[in-house]
Image: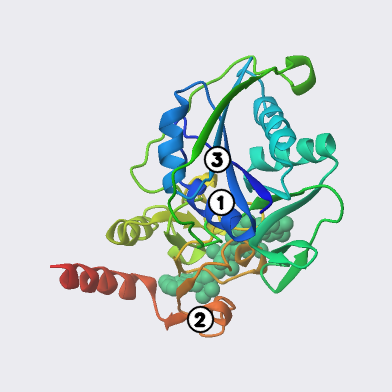
Amino acid sequence: MSSVLVLIDTTPEGDVAPAAASLLGAAARLGSPVAVVVSDRDAAAFGATLGALGAETVAVVTPSDAAVLAGPAVEALVAAAADHSPMAILLTNSVAGREIAGRLAVRLGGGVAVDAVDVTAGPDGVVVTHSVFGGTYSVTSGVVGGPAIITVREGAIDARAEARTATVTSASVAVDAARHGAIEAVHAAAATSDRPDLRTASRVVSGGRGLGSKDKFELVGRLADTLGAAVGASRAAVDAGYIEQTAQVGQTGTTVAPELYVALGISGAIQHRAGMQTAKTIVAINTDADAPIFEIADFGIVGDVFTVVPQLIDAIEAKRA
Ligand code: FAD
């Protein structure tokens, strides 16, 4: 069976990031998953973690210089591609993932397919599904010649691979700072929220202009905390100063694909839908029965968020008790 390389993202602490499970699940559908980790930590520990997520082989690659932008990951994947001749290479659809994918395609002579929401094995290679024009259409693409280098939208693919005992290899690669661009300074930004990360959360509660003010936007956080969800927002809510820009969901914000997306006081403009339409279940609360968000909602409540949401919170808490 052909190999499929998966670039494993790591957390700032150096552990395996949550996206690995979905990427390895997707890779197992296509061929034999080979997890590639760029790290100077003990290779055996990665073997156990990634084997449990379905990796057949775990290649831990230590770069000669880690203080380089996309370079270490590109060099690690180029080396792994030489060893495994993969049919496809999967990465997360993050800013870094897309940059690595582009550089890799040049080096390997492959083709890039970005922001995949599904991947399947077709008769002529990997068939990649994309959700485009704000989720209005689903289109498929494939790569002819060279490996298919695919960035996958986080949360979009539910597939999980069976656990196995992985073969672990370790290697080092030379990274040329002049070729890739060196990092001259790093300023750590402290995270101030205990809530889940918006990009990877399985539940997201978002608020829009309908919340009316920064103080009233606090209601979005209350429902999010009741559900253990991340907080998102429409651009209108961000522009009005109700919440910081990092919470913006949509075409010019973050793309999310959670199990549950709750839209409070959001009209459902196409630019907002572009960032959340692939959520598995969408719940909308809006006073306007004609708001476009109801066209894509699985459950819709026509009502005032300040009346409905407190009742919803009480009902969830009562059910838990
Ligand atoms: P509105 O459209 O004003 O809707 C507010 C809604 O709240 C209304 O439907 C109203 O009925 C409802 N409401 C009011 N009061 C209540 C209440 N008490 N209870 C319940 N409901 C109530 N937008 C994004 O979100 N993300 C993006 O990434 C993004 N990128 C963009 C990029 C470009 C190039 C452009 C041109 C626009 C972009 N936009 C984006 C903006 C987008 O077009 C909309 O303007 C925006 O999404 C509207 O936000 P909203 O739904 O919160 O506000």
Residues under numbered marks 2 and 3 in contact, where contact means CB atoms less than 8 Å apart:
no
| Quadrant (top left, top right, bottom left, bottom right) of the N terminus | bottom right
Whether 83 is drawn above or below 259: the answer is above
Q: Callout 2: 10 Å neighbours few (<14), some, many (20+)?
A: some
Whether 320 is drawn above or below 172: the answer is below
Query: Looking at the image, is mark 2 or mark 1 earlier in the sequence?
Result: 1
Which residue is tagged 1? 23
Q: Is residue 163 left or right of residue 8?
A: left
Label 1, secondary structure: give it. helix
Q: Is residue 205 left or right of residue 256?
A: left
Residue 122 percent location from the top left of the image: 73, 67
Which residue is tagged 3? 57
Say whether mark 2 is within 8 Å of ligand 1: yes
Q: Nearer the viewer, residue 124 or 315?
A: 124
At x 46% / y 61%, what residue is drawn? 206
Q: Mark 3 and mark 1: span between their CA atoms?
A: 14 Å
